[in-house]
Image (cartoon, rainbow, N blue to C red):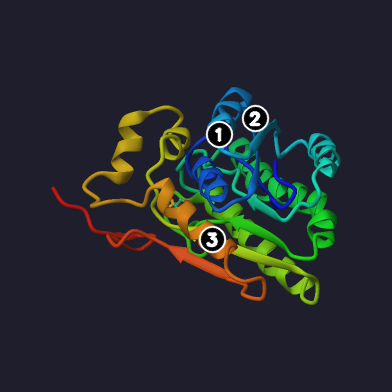
Amino acid sequence: MTAEARTAVVTGASSGIGAATARALAAAGYHVVLTARRKDRIEALAAELPNAEAYALDVTDRAAVDAFAADLGRHPSVDVLVNNAGGALGAEPVATGDPADWRTMYEVNVLGVLHMTQALLPALTASGDGTVVVLSSTAGHGTYEGGGGYVAAKHGAHVIAETLRLELCGEPVRVIEVAPGMVKTDEFATTRFRGDTDKAAKVYAGVDQPLSAEDVADTIAWAITRPSHVNVDLLVVRPRAQASNSKVHRTG
Ligand code: 8X3
C-alpha cells in the first residue's frame, strides 16, 4: 500500500455490485478493504487487485464490526465506506411473508448499514474528507406487489442515508445514496427465490439489457470520485427498459 493511497471499505464485496465496486475503486487508486462473510471469495478478488486486502465480516454481527473498525486503525485514514451488503429473501405478499425473512432482511439491509456506519464514522470524520455510500434500491423509493420485507428494509436503508446527511451537515463527510433498479447479478434473484433458478430467470426474461454489476459500480465510483464539496445525494439508476418498479418492457 502506498503512503498516499486513500482507503475504501466495501461490504458484500464477494460478488455482484460489491465485487465490481471493489474493482472500480481499486482502479480509481484506492486501497480497498473487501469485506464479506465468504473469506475465500474476497481473498481471491483482493489478490487480483493492485492495492487491496480482505477481511471476513458479517455486518449483522456488531461485535465483529467493532473489532474490524479497530483493526482499520492500521491505515493512515479511512476515507470511504460503501455499504453494499444486503439482499432480498422471498417475494411473497405481505399477507403470507415469513416474519423470519423480514427479520433477516432488516438485519442485513438496515442494521448492517447502521453497524458499519456507526463503527467507522469516527475514522471517516477524522479523515477530514469522508464518504459514506448507502446502496439502497429503487425498492427503497417505491413499492411493488411481492416486494414485502425487501421493500420495507430498503426504505429503511434510504431513511438512514437521508437522516445521516442531515445530521452530518457541517462535518467533512458526504452521504451518497445509490438506488439501482433492475440489476442482473449472479446471486440477487437466485437468493431471493432460494435457489430456484427458473424463477430467478423470469425476473429478467425478455428485458433488453438489465443493468450489470459493473454499470452500478461505475455510478458508485463516479459519485465517490467527484470533488469533495460535491455530494451526490441520491443517484437512481435503472436500465432503459425499466421505467418504474412495475413498468418493464419485455420482448417475446
Ligand atoms: C433490486 C431492485 O426491483 O428487484 O434492488 O426490488 S428490485
Judging by the rendered image, the residue that carries numbered circle 2 is: 37
Label 2: state its secondary structure: loop
Q: Position of residue 113 (x, y in %)?
A: 69, 50
CB contact under 8 Å: marks 2 and 1: yes
Q: Is residue 138 left or right of residue 156?
A: left
Q: Position of residue 17 (x, y in %)?
A: 49, 45
Seen at 62% across and 40% down, the residue is 51
Number of other residues with Cα within 10 Å of mark 3, as a class: few under 14, some 14 to 19, many 20 or more: many
Amino acid residing under circle 2 = Arg
193 or 26: nearer the eye? 26
Seen at 41% across and 40% down, the residue is 185
Number of other residues with Cα within 10 Å of mark 1, as a class: few under 14, some 14 to 19, many 20 or more: many
Mark 2 CB within 8 Å of ligand 1: no
Amino acid residing under circle 1 = Ser
Q: Earlier in the sequence, mark 2 or mark 1?
A: 1
Amino acid residing under circle 3 = Val
- Up-down: is 152 above or below 73? below
Label 1: state its secondary structure: loop
Quadrant (top left/top right/bottom left/bottom right) for the N terminus: top right
CA gap between label 2 and label 1 equals 8 Å
- Up-down: is 115 above or below 167? above
Judging by the rendered image, the residue that carries numbered circle 3 is: 178
User: What mark, if any, has residue 14 been given in the picture?
Assistant: 1
CB contact under 8 Å: marks 3 and 2: no
Q: Position of residue 24 (x, y in %)?
A: 51, 49
125 or 107: nearer the eye? 125
Q: Is residue 136 left or right of residue 92?
A: right
Q: Earlier in the sequence, mark 1 or mark 3?
A: 1
Number of other residues with Cα within 10 Å of mark 2, as a class: few under 14, some 14 to 19, many 20 or more: some
Seen at 78% across and 57% down, the residue is 124
Seen at 58% across and 44% down, the residue is 86
